[in-house]
Amino acid sequence: MLGACILSSMEALVCFDSTTHAIMAERELMAIPFPATVMPLPSEIHAGCGFCLRLPSSCFEEALRLLRERGIPFGGTYTRRETDEQDIYTVWTGDGGMIDE
């Protein structure tokens, strides 16, 4: 739910096969409004067109649901957690589970 969408140190990344889909997704989510931003894909992740959508992890599942409803295709989904030494990217499995990458 959008009301539960809060900013935190954990972020979600959604990959796309085309830049067009990444920008469409950003526009759709920002119109709701979700705090979503298109950004270059981190070098630790190799997927899609090289761009991803970044949003707070608290919005992740709701954002994916909305993208599916609007027919915007997306690829890999990840979470990013900051530590003092590095960013840790984890694959989101689609069932709420996480797999360290």
Image: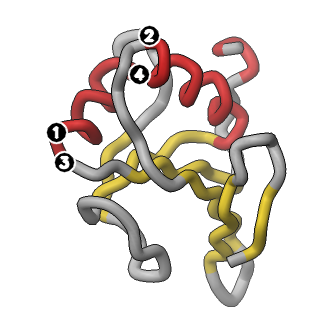
Q: Residue 19's mark?
A: 3
Q: Are marks 3 and 2 in contact (CB under 8 Å)?
A: no
Q: Specify few, some or many for label 2: CA neighbours under 10 Å numbering under 14, 14-19, or 20 or more.
A: few
Q: Is residue 77 above or below residue 42?
A: above
Q: Quadrant of residue 23?
A: top left
Quadrant where the N terminus sits is: top right
Q: Which residue is at 41% across, 75% downward? A: 46
Q: Amino acid at mark 3?
A: Thr
CA separation in Å, label 1 and label 3 = 4 Å
**Residue ranking furthest to the bottom:** 85
Instruction: Pick whichever, 33 or 91, lies toward us.
Output: 91
Q: Residue 89's mark?
A: none
Q: Specify few, some or many for label 1: CA neighbours under 10 Å numbering under 14, 14-19, or 20 or more.
A: few
Instruction: Pick whichever, 72 or 57, lies toward us.
Output: 72
CA separation in Å, label 4 and label 1 = 14 Å
- The residue carrying mark 1 is 20
Q: Specify few, some or many for label 4: CA neighbours under 10 Å numbering under 14, 14-19, or 20 or more.
A: some
Q: Are marks 1 and 3 in contact (CB under 8 Å)?
A: yes
CA separation in Å, label 3 and label 2 = 21 Å
